[in-house]
Image (tube, coloured by chain):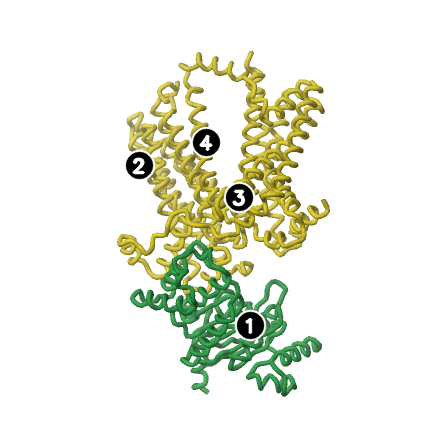
Chain colours: A green, B yellow
Amino acid sequence: MNDLQDHRMIELKNLTKRYGDTLAVSNLNLSVSKGEIYGFIGPNGAGKTTTIRIMGGVLEPTEGMVVIGGINMADHPESVKRKIGFIPDRPFIYEKLTGMEFMRFSADLYGVDEGVFLEKAQALLKKFAILNWADELIESYSHGMKQRLIISSALLHDPTVIIVDEPMVGLDPAAIKMVKDMFRDLAEMGTTIFISTHTLAVAEDICDRIGIIHRGALIATGTTGDLRRIAGVEDADLEEVFLNLTTEEQKLQ
Amino acid sequence: MKEILALLKPRFWSFRNGSYSKDAKNHGLKGLLFGIVGLLFWAGIFVIFYRVLVYFQGVQGFGDVLARKLMSMVLVTLFSLLIFSSIITCLTKLYLSKDLILVHSMPVSTAKIFLARWFESTIDSSWMVIVYMLPVFLSYGIVYKAGLLFYTTVGLTILPLCLIASGISALAVVLVAVILPAGRLRSFFIFFGFALFLVLLIAFRLMRPERLVNPDTFASLILYFKSLETPGSPFLPTTWIFDSIQAALQGQVGSAVFDLALTWSFAIAMIFVITWISGATYFTGYSKAQTTAGRLFPFRGGRSRQWTYVLNHLSGPVRAFTVKEIKTFFRDQTQWPQIFLIIALIVIYLYNFSVLPLDKSPIKTVYLQNIFSFLNMGLATFVLTAVAVRFVYPAVSIEGEAFWIVRSSPVKIRTLLWIKFCVYYVPLLILTEILIVISNMLLHVTPFMMCLSVATVFLMVPGIVAMGVGFGAAYPDFQSENPAQSVTSFGGLLFMILCAGFIATVIVLEAGPVYTVFMACFRGVSLSVLQWIWLVFSFSLVLILCILAVIVPMRWGERCLSRNDKIF
């Protein structure tokens, strides 16, 4: 049991978030192991982004806790955030900095060694095909380029946990394939990845386990096989499983 | 027309829905505060103009001339203000608003989009100017016992004045957007701000206000007053409006109606012209504005050796945010005109002191110098407050929608706020100390007053900067298209009021004991024990107040910002 707990990189315990009278996340409990890619899917307004933002330390939960690498976010937010690479769904960044300046800004924040910074930053920017734009102001970047820059900066400090909200939005097919391959490689090397997405094909393709959230509550979790069994549709794809489970839940409510 | 109204509906509905929003519970308090401050300003303007006009009426021969000249100046100032504010709002409404992509994708002609936006801009840029001009005209009406014709004429002339000013601004903006190379639209702000700075300086220099307090120049002033009778240019809309209102004030219906007709016909012609020109050019300019702004100055890669040396002494997060703050501030070209304006404000401020005719005053010079020095402390810190509300207060809001970076980074909100405090504290302290030292040197104050002023300002600047950061953190606006506009928000107003209170309290606490010390020195006697106690008590209170002004707002801002969920 203790061995299992040691491998839990992400733990959400009784996580609840209320916006005034609106219950966005309700008593959420889940855990993700080291090196696992966990997909978080759900309809619009289900509470995915709220959960992701609480996990990234961007929002405070109303109740419950987020434990990353055995450390409670509420007790030591800075230590936890140093372990995380957070990638939001909308690429809002400092428009008046250049791409390379933003990378240096992230490096300074997350304590990346000055000796290795330049080499790592250039390698990441090259990987994401934006090295030629490194000295241009971010305001001149396209949506996809900003998204690539955010992903690059999130990987700069070698995070042990990556939390991503809609990673493929704004990326071209080549970049999507590259990101998917990279996530798989990182997971193999022990990085834990938590992905929230609407793109069910992406979830099915790269995630080891998937959780379905509906109206703030986790209604099912497991491998795609487990989800098929829960939904009672053995030969269906994830889309059908998803629709089946969320519609069923809606009927029950 | 139907389409123009449809384009204006979202604005109207958003305004109406404001009372249903989640923030509505605070609207009562905010409305009350804005209402009281607004009413006080309104009443203040009325009282000042009423008293000035009553005083003018008592000046034999010149009274009516002065009153007429004052109205002419008010109208020209009003017109200039309207043009200035319209240019800013037109640029935003026509080229920079976030909803423009959606609006331009709709099946509506460019001219109609332009007209809807221009109409919205006219209301936004004019309503406040109109509201605060009403007490001016009301005071004229009461002092000159005017009838219904005057009030009707005023009402009917102000409207075309706003339309003409807004029309001229829109025309200038639309043409500049077409002429300027792609992406250079924002740079227009810089040149506009610089031009405004020069105009302000030249206008002030030409006014030579020092002559008004120098009795030796009265002979030439009589000649000057005679020149006041010169009418304005017949080609200026303000001249027609002035003539119309003056005619109405004297009960000359025909003349009032003629000038009114002239004004209205010009306003309507203006609308036709801008609609026609915008139909042909607005979309071209809008398309160009979508292109990325080119750099005004070429990029200098890397950090200099000195810069690197300084930065290496800072911790990673502090270095990251310090560099980011400084770079984004200086690269944001919309900030630059504000800097020019502040330089103009400081030059005018110091120029005032350089021309004060202290030696010609009937009051003993040494008294006057020290009284001015004391007032100078208050004025300099109030200038600092004006600068702080423009630059320090929006410092948190300026993070905008990129604030998620701060929230997800391993940096405490407290650290971020203190970094912002330090970044603004150092230049503002230098600025205020320079201001106070130079103005005191111009006043030739005693060494005691010089030391007191420098020390007091040194203690007050951290408090004012901390209040700016703290209030900015407590009332952030991350969604604003222009965070600098948060100056006029509830938090900005509250910050200004509390700063004024803080400055006044410090000055009052110091004034009494300093006067006692001053009088004791003047009479050559030493202070009594009770006076010493009072002195120590007052200065201790000043010290405590200045420390509290730093700690309390910073902690409050940190708490509010940490708990703020609305920002996402």
Residue type marked 2? Cys
Question: Residue B500 at what x, y percent from top left?
Answer: 47, 40
Tell me which residue sits at (62%, 55%) in the image: B102
Residue neighbourhood size for the residue with mark 4, other residues' Cα within 10 Å, grouped as few (<14), some (14–19), many (≥20): some
Which residue is under mark 2?
B451
Which residue is under mark 1?
A197
The span from disc 4 to disc 2 (Cα, nearest Å) is 33 Å
Which residue is under mark 4?
B200
Q: Which of marks 2 and 3 precedes in the sequence?
A: 3
Question: Residue A197 at what x, y percent from top left?
Answer: 55, 72
Marks 1 and 3 belong to one chain: no
- Do the CB atoms of the residues marked 2 and 1 lie less than 8 Å apart? no
Q: Secondary structure at mark 4?
A: helix
Question: Residue B558 at what x, y percent from top left?
Answer: 46, 57
Q: Secondary structure at mark 2?
A: helix
Residue type marked 4? Leu
Q: Is residue A223 above or below residue B29?
A: below
Marks 4 and 2 belong to one chain: yes
